[in-house]
Each structure stands twice: as structure tokens, then as C-alpha cells.
Image (cartoon, rainbow, N blue to C red):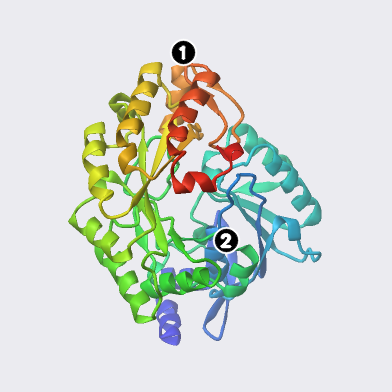
Amino acid sequence: MFIYEVLSACLNMKKFIKYFFYIKKNKYYLRIYLFGICIYNSLKRVLFINPENHFFEESNPIAILDIAQYLRYRGIKVDVCEYKNLPISSQYDLIGISCVSSYGGEIFNQLEKIRKNFPFSKIVIGGKWSTTMLPEDKIKLKTLNINVEINKAELVYTGDEKIDFKKYPSWNKKDFDILYKRDQIMTSRGCPFNCNFCNNTEEKINYFSVKRTVDNIELVLQKRENVYFVDDVFVTNFEHAKSIYDECKRRNINIENHNHFFVHLNTVNENTIKLIQLYKPNFIEVGIESGDDRILKLMNKKTSTDKIRKTLPLLSKYTQIYALWIVGYPYETIESLENSYKLAVEMQQYIEFSWVSHYIPLFGTEGYKMAKESGGQFLEISNNKTISFIPKGLTSNTLIEYRKRIMELNKSNYYFKKCKMEDI
């Protein structure tokens, strides 16, 4: 097949250029073919670094686990490491760093050390932070000669026009052992919803193969008792989720009662209930966000308090509910905060645990624009336990008080007991 494709390319100039040259930003690189594997002579050795995360709960660096193996299958030598274990060798053509957020100013201290350790390597920042960083952050990175890439990582490193998600390779066990933090995996990428507080950059959902997903489930279950499916909405595609379950059963992987995942209220239907009954999750996470219809509309949540009141009792019949809330969204008021608290009290009989986040205005989102237009006060972003934005007319003490009041409803619940008070 490979030889046929190359011969066909030679008969068509456009295909010839596409097959034998890698074109990116007006730069041309000759492609070298060896045993059917394409190697870019401009990119021979890559190092991916997972920066230190200062949140109280660290996450698996899924982006690095994905792209490292993807590049290896393209013939590129790849190493991975944690920031605290930087390799001594500096012989890397490119250093890739994936950041979910800036983690505060500390990230720049890490980047300065990385640049010092690898003075001649090209360094690229990717991940969610690349799409939400402030202009002044980009200026700081420019002084460190660090590039920011906002495209899909696969396209940045390979130049491909399309990613074949069905043939996407499974994680490498050695990478996983080095970077393992928790129990998260993704079976798909993208989200069909456009919540204004979110920085989702992939609106189209692309599904990984069932084999790849279950391979990764096996890796996680070697270290943990549970799997956390962190897809934006895990149960949007019934056949996909059902196929994963069936493959787990075929391999004698006991997935029932050993998983949890997100459910959007707008996706709850008969098929959703069927999947919950199959997987028997320990709990599901549901983004309620607010108990005020005006705020829900500003968030573009496409739900309502009526739908919340109708759906939570239904879901609670089949599993425990982990509710997610946000306080301090632009144009929040005492009245809207009080409405959230009242709804939390009303729904608490159906909710096992509530996590309340302080709103974080992410640059480039509609929520950020609202925050700017509303005249609220911006503070340094750290994490969702601390205040990054104070809506006009409110105070930090008010936001802290309402977050505390909703969280204190958890005192009799199991998951609350596992949390330390200082983490709340």
C-alpha cells in the first residue's frame, strides 16, 4: 500500500509535494522515508515535560501521554519527564510543555529553568493555557524564546491535515509509569456545548477507538481501583460508550462500580440511564453551576432550574451525584447567590457531594468579555478555590461565605469526609 501511494504521488504534482515535503509557515522540509515510516529531518528528538501542578489535586497529563505515542508511531524519538526530573542531556530538537493553566506566576520560574537547561532547543507551550493566556504572558514567553501553539498538538508536530482518531495509538506503559498521577482517561475529544465560562476549543466530538480506550483502562486499573472518564460529556454517544463496556466485559475487566464520569443535564435520556445502569458508576458529575436562571442564561448553559429540579431526582435513583457549582460569575448578585444556595438546600437530598468553584475569567472566552464589560475586579488567577474575579457590587467575603454555605451542606457525606478542610 505504501509503495502504491508513493508511486501515485509521483504522478500528481500536488500529491508529490504533499508526500515528500512538509510545508509549514512557508518553510519546506524534505521528508525522509525509511521502511514506510515518514521522518522529518527537522525533528528527530522531542522531550515532553509535565510542569508541576499547584492545585491540591493533580491530574494525569493526558495530552502528553497521547501525543508522545502518536509521534513515536510517526518515527520520531520521544522522551517524557516530570519537571522535577529534567534529564541531564540537552540534545533535543524540540521541548513540548502542556499546561492546563498558568498555575499562577510559578509557571514562569519553571519555564526559566527549562530554558536554562535547554538553551539551544526550540520550546513550545501547548494545552488549554495556550488559548487563554493573557497578552502579558505571551510577552514573558517571548523573552524566554518560547513559542505558543494554539492548534491541535498533532498538527503542530506533524503538519498533518487530519488526525485519524480511529487509528490513534494506545498509551505507552513506560510513559504512564513516569507521568501517572490519578485515574483519568479520555475516550473522546471535544464538546457539543458552548458554555461561556469554558475554553473548549474543539466543538466537534472525535471518538478514539474502543481498543485504544480499553487498553488505557487496563493501564489505569493496574494502579487504581477506579477509572475517571474525563470526556466533557461521556455519554453523548450511546453506541460508543456501550462498545467500550462490551470490550471491557470481553477482556474480563470489571468496570462496573469502578468508574465515574460527567453527565450534562441536556444529555439525560433513556440511553443515558441505560449506560448508567450498565457501568454502575460510583458517582456521576453534573454541572449545575447556578441556581439562578438569569445567571444560567448568561453562562449559555442551555439548562434551567426547572430542568435541574426534574433531572437530579431521576439520576439519583441510579447512582450518586457529585454536583458542580460556580459562584462569582459576571453580573452575579446577592439575590442570584441566595438562589443558588436555596437550590442546593432543596436538591441536597439527591446530591452526595457538591463542589463549588470560584469563577475564573479565562482570557478569550465569552465569560471573560462579560467580566470586562461588567466592571468587576480582577485578581491573580490561582485555582478555583481562590477568588480570581469579584463581580461589581459584591465583595470577596460574600463570595467566600456563599461558597462555604453550599460546601457545608456536605458535612454528613462520605466524599466530604475525604477532603481536608483547608482544601475547601
Identify the residue at horizontal 75%, vertical 60% (top origin): 86
The residue lying at 42 percent from left, 34 percent from top is 409
Q: Which of marks 2 and 1 is nearer the N terminus?
A: 2
According to the picture, the residue beneath numbered tag 1 turns out to be 393
| Side of 53 relative to 188 (left or right) | right
Please state the horizontal and vertical placement of residue 151, each as a whole percent of the image: 50, 52
Q: Where is residue 169 in the image (x, y as percent from the top left)?
A: 48, 73
Callout 1 crowding tier (Cα within 10 Å): few <14, some 14–19, many ≥20 = few
Asked if residue 232 is positioned above or below residue 206 in the image, the reply reads above
Pick the front one: 329 or 90:
329
As drawn, 359 above or below 231: above
Give the quarter of the image for residue 330: top left
Relative to the observer, which residue lies in front, 46 or 378? 378
Instruction: Name the amino acid, label 2.
Output: Ile
For label 2, the crowd category at 10 Å Cα-Cα, with few meaning under 14, some 14 to 19 and many 20 or more, is: many
* Figure check: 216 above or below 186: below
Dots 2, 1 in contact, CB < 8 A = no
Look at 78% across and 49% down and name the residue there.
113
* Image quarter (top left, top right, bottom left or bottom right) of the N terminus: bottom left
Q: In which quarter of the image is the C terminus?
A: top right
Viewer-proximal residue among 29 and 366: 366
Disc 2 to disc 1, C-alpha distance: 42 Å
Q: Among all residues in the image, which is located at the extreme left?
A: 270
Task: Please provide percent x and percent y for residue 222.
Answer: 53, 73
Residue 58 has which mark? none
State whether residue 189 appears in this view: no
Secondary structure at numbered mark 2: helix
Mark 1: which amino acid? Gly
**313 left or right of 65 in image:** left
| Image coords of residue 25 (percent x, y) | 55, 54
For label 1, the SS is: loop
Write down the residue under mark 2: 64
